[in-house]
Image: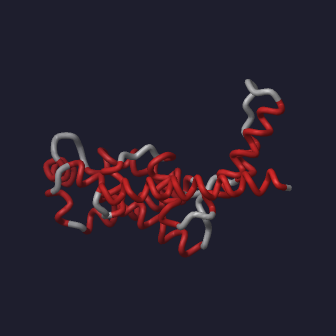
Amino acid sequence: MRLVNTENAQYGEHGTLYDRFAVTIFQYLCQQVSNVQDAEDLLLEVFLAALQDESLSDRPAGQQLAWLRRVARNKVIDRYRHIALLNLLPIEQALEMEDTALTPEQYTERQENYERLYQSIAQLSALQRELIRLRYRNGLRYFEIAAILEKPEGAVRQLVVRTLRQLRIIYDQQERGNSNE
């Protein structure tokens, strides 16, 4: 009981660091790994790292969350380095998604566009794929991405713009290549 009171005092009136941020970090991890068990393992590793960082409790909540997100991102990267897998939505899964509001022709065209987009994204660098994932899949703002990547916000904005330009070029090249066949 005394340990719980110490933790509450350490992390403020809103509960422990875990209570405040575990759901957010867990959701991020679930999006990054292939199964819930891996996400739970990584969540444990993130909060074990947080326990070892004594200065974390002195930081404001926004910085604490940014630190936890950065650690979670690094843990995911480490996990994938060990098992050598890419974390992209499988094309087969995207192709199986059904939209009943479209005509068969529209549906086929849409699926071809998705396939071309996924192939284009796969040609980007790992950092560019991460930027796309953080910005558009996870819906993070530029300052949040900057904190995770430990880069200035302006640099992150420029990287995203350049990445989108490069993605457009790759996508258009693939579209021209498909229309020439």
Q: How far across and down, in percent of the image, does residue 96 sit?
A: 76, 42
As drawn, the residue found furthest toward the right would be 181
The front one of 57 and 139 is: 139
Position of the C terminus by quadrant: bottom right
Q: How many marks?
A: 0
In the displayed structure image, the side of residue 165 where residue 170 appears, left or right: right
In the displayed structure image, the side of residue 39 where residue 104 appears, left or right: right
- Chosen colour scheme: secondary structure
As drawn, the residue found furthest toward the top would be 101
Q: How far across and down, in percent of the image, does residue 14 sit?
A: 21, 40
The front one of 164 and 95 is: 164
| Residue under the point 44% across and 53% down | 161
The front one of 11 and 96 is: 96
- Please tell me whether residue 53 is drawn above or below residue 113 in the rendered image: below
Q: Would residue 1 be seen by someone viewing this image from the given angle? A: no
Q: In which quarter of the view is residue 98 placed?
A: top right
Q: Would residue 179 be seen by someone viewing this image from the given angle? A: yes
As drawn, the residue found furthest toward the bottom would be 82
In the displayed structure image, the side of residue 19 where residue 131 appears, left or right: right
| Residue under the point 36% across and 46% down | 141
| Residue under the point 72% across and 48% down | 93
Q: How far across and down, in percent of the image, does residue 3 sit?
A: 20, 54
In the displayed structure image, the side of residue 90 where residue 4 appears, left or right: left
Q: How far across and down, in percent of the image, does residue 159 sit?
A: 41, 59
The front one of 156 and 73 is: 156
